[in-house]
Image (tube, rainbow, N blue to C red):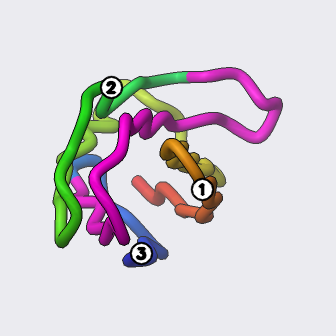
């Protein structure tokens, strides 16, 4: 999975799936509140990219969580405006 560090209000999140899976990719703030769901669908194995428009969000640290059928990963992003 790609990492995003020092993102701007429009950022691309890159990730790679090892197998075809039902995917949910969501963004959370520092308090653990879900602020966006970017992907919620079955995706094939391989490289993927999704855009997050954080224009209305405050500067700070955010986390994106990707859940698959047999895996989960968490990455950190820093939004600076």
**Of the numbered discs in the image, which one, if any, rests on residue 1?**
3
**First in sequence: mark 3 vs mark 1:** 3
Q: Is residue 46 left or right of residue 8?
A: left
**First in sequence: mark 3 vs mark 2:** 3
Query: How far apart, in angstroms, are the residues tagged by discs 3 and 1?
Result: 12 Å
Quarter of the rendering containing residue 67: top right
Query: How far apart, in angstroms, are the residues tagged by discs 1 and 2?
Result: 15 Å
Secondary structure at numbered mark 1 = loop
Q: Which residue is mark 2?
A: 40
Which residue is at 38% across, 38% downward?
23
Discs 3/1, front? 1
Quarter of the rendering containing residue 33: top right
Q: Which residue is mark 1?
A: 71
Q: Is residue 23 magenta?
A: yes
Q: Position of residue 8 (x, y in %)?
A: 31, 59
Q: Specify the quadrant that holds the N terminus.
A: bottom left
Quarter of the rendering containing residue 14: bottom left
Instruction: Give the residues in magenta.
Output: 11-34
Secondary structure at numbered mark 3 = loop
Is residue 42 positioned above or below 8 on the image?
above
Q: Are marks 1 and 2 in contact (CB under 8 Å)?
A: no
Discs 1/2, front? 1
Q: Is residue 2 left or right of residue 76?
A: left
Which residue is at 45% across, 30% downward?
57
């Amino acid at each position: 999975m790609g990492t995003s560090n020092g993102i701007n209000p429009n950022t691309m999140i890159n990730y790679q799936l090892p197998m075809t899976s039902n995917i949910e990719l969501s963004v959370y703030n520092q308090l653990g509140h879900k602020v966006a769901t970017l992907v919620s669908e079955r995706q094939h194995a391989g490289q993927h990219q999704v855009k997050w428009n954080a224009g209305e969000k405050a500067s700070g640290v955010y986390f994106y969580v990707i859940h698959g059928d047999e895996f989960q990963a968490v990455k950190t992003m820093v939004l600076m405006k």
